[in-house]
Image (tube, rainbow, N blue to C red):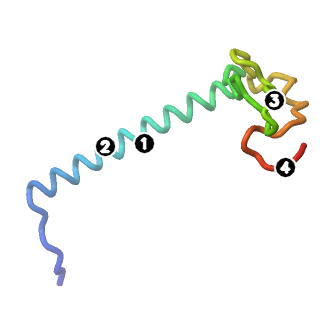
Amino acid sequence: MSTARKRTAAEAERVRQVNLLARLWQSAAMADALWHGWTAVDGSFAVWTGPVKDNTGKVVIPKGKVFKQTDMELESMNYLIEGVIGKA
């Protein structure tokens, strides 16, 4: 025999609202993931946007400079980003 009580109309409405919000959030998250996935594939996603400093305080990517995922300059990064402890 079940001991669970039946939901009131207000509780049932709240559950319906929460479920709707969860589905909307999932849809928005999926759309965002798909968008970023597509921009990563087509090369238009900006991986780095200046200004960026290394961990010694030197500006390594000037203000306004944008590096996309396909930029070859990213292959020769020989510095650590500001806030990273260590030496390159």
Q: In this view, does 10 lie to the left or right of 81?
A: left
Residue at 17% in and 75% down: 4
Above or below for 39 versus 7? above
User: Which tag, 1 or 2, sits closer to the chain's start?
Assistant: 2
Mark 3 burial class by Cα count in 10 Å: few <14, some 14-19, many 20+:
few
Res 41 seen here: no
Circles 1 and 4: CB atoms closer than 8 Å: no
- The residue type indicated by label 1 comes to Gln
Question: What residue is shown with label 2?
Answer: 21
User: Which tag, 4 or 2, sits closer to the chain's start?
Assistant: 2
Q: Residue 26 carries which label?
A: 1
User: Percent from the top left, x then y, of residue 3?
Assistant: 16, 80
Disc number lying in front (4 or 2): 4
Depth check: give the residue in front, 74 or 50: 50
Query: The C terminus appears in which quarter of the rendering?
Result: top right
Disc 4 and disc 3: Cα gap in Å?
15 Å
User: Which tag, 2 or 3, sits closer to the chain's start?
Assistant: 2
Q: Residue 86 carries which label?
A: 4
Q: Is residue 6 left or right of residue 86?
A: left
User: Which tag, 1 or 4, sits closer to the chain's start?
Assistant: 1
Disc 4 and disc 2: Cα gap in Å?
44 Å
Circles 1 and 2: CB atoms closer than 8 Å: no
Question: What residue is shown with label 3?
Answer: 58
- The residue type indicated by label 2 comes to Leu
User: Percent from the top left, x then y, of residue 28?
Assistant: 43, 35
- The residue type indicated by label 3 comes to Lys
Describe the element under mark 1 as helix, strand or loop.
helix
Above or below for 81 versus 9? above
Mark 2 burial class by Cα count in 10 Å: few <14, some 14-19, many 20+:
few
Circles 3 and 1: CB atoms closer than 8 Å: no
Depth check: give the residue in front, 79 or 15: 79
Disc 3 and disc 1: Cα gap in Å?
41 Å
